[in-house]
Amino acid sequence: MIDNINLIVPKQGTMKVIHKLKDLWRRDTNTYSGHLKNMGFYQNLDGIIVRGSLAKYLNDENITPLTREQVEIAIKKLEEETELDFSTARVRGLEFGVSIITKEKPSEYLNLFGYPPVFTRQEYSKNKGIETVTYTTNKGAFGFSGYDKIKEMVQKRQGIPDLFQNVNVLRLEYKIKKRRGIKTKFCKDLTAYDIYSENIYRNLQDLFLKAYKAIPKYGRRCYFNISENITPTQWTEMLAEQYRQAFPKDSLSLQQSLREVGALTDKNRERIRAAEKRRSKDYSMSDKSPLVAELDAHVLNIMQN
């Protein structure tokens, strides 16, 4: 499930890798860049930075997630081809992702991804719906994204394996973008060898799941309990929650507009948020969206297997 990596390899002797690179661009005696297949290389005074998708490097496509064993094979193959020692290569960033075959178009699921307090949410959409939803932390060290993987591969003119032909594929990725982020999550630097160790791999699975679960999901079905009398307050709350679940962006936009013109005070905004939080936990009022239930089951099954 590890895909893109960003490594820095300390300088080692004559660095024979320079003679293996294509499109070599040499800036001076200490700085150059080039690539080997899809992997990019950039040398500076600190060492060689290696970036790219391990899955694409190993299999010529990155829609099929790598197993932990395949990650090791990819690292060892890259090490052999470049004649670099990756045992001391520090990890500066990586992506841990899954490709999920879904019943509906990915945009239908991404529409239900909400606004967690720990992330800033951005989306890229066209007239046919959302194509990508991206979450980043304030300092940019961590992120999470979901996007239409088939659409991306078609746009990049990449070959699609038989397993993913004529199906919908939602790609979900957890990202650690900086060395500081690595040290925050693992309390130490990681080497290229560490990322395929069982312990680190399981930690990455846990971090992926934690980030996925931290994103509130909308689209829950609201209903009335007809065995009881409905009060006006219950009626109002039900309609408010129905609107929020069906139109989460519109609900937030309306509140923001009211705050900007002074029609909604901070105190009343907090009361509204508290009511929303209470209703979100009230499963007698509404159930999980069928699409979210499907997605949750896929994610859990992939992590368990």
Image (cartoon, helix red, strand yellow):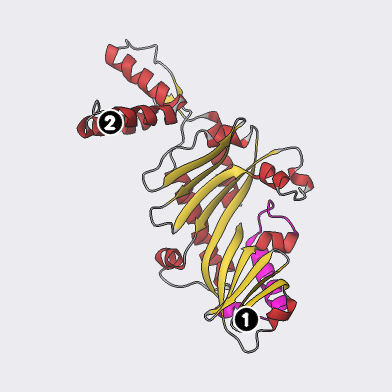
Predominant SS of the magenta segment: helix
Q: In this view of the protein, which residue sits in the foreground, 305 or 232?
A: 232
Going by the numbered disc 2, the residue's amino acid type is Arg
Q: In this view of the protein, which residue sits in the foreground, 205 or 86?
A: 86
Q: Which residues are magenta?
A: 60-88
Q: Is residue 277 magenta?
A: no
> According to the image, label 1 marks what residue?
85
Residue shown at the point (38%, 24%) measured from the top left: 241
* Pointer 2 or 1: first along the chain: 1
For residue 111, the mark is none
Q: Is residue 119 above or below residue 49?
A: above
Q: Position of residue 195 (x, y in %)?
A: 56, 67
Q: Does 50 sit left or right of 184 as displayed?
A: right
Residue shown at the point (40%, 26%) measured from the top left: 244
Q: In this view of the protein, which residue sits in the foreground, 101 or 94?
A: 94
Q: Residues within 10 Å of mark 2 (few under 14, many from 20)?
A: some
> According to the image, label 2 marks what residue?
259
Q: Secondary structure at mark 2?
A: helix
Q: Is residue 226 above or below residue 63?
A: above
Residue shown at the point (50%, 50%) measured from the top left: 144
Q: Is residue 171 above or below residue 291?
A: below
Going by the numbered disc 1, the residue's amino acid type is Asp
Whether residue 293 appears in this view of the structure is no
Q: Position of residue 240 (x, y in %)?
A: 36, 21
Residue shown at the point (25%, 34%) measured from the top left: 270
Residue at the bottom extreme of this rendering? 13
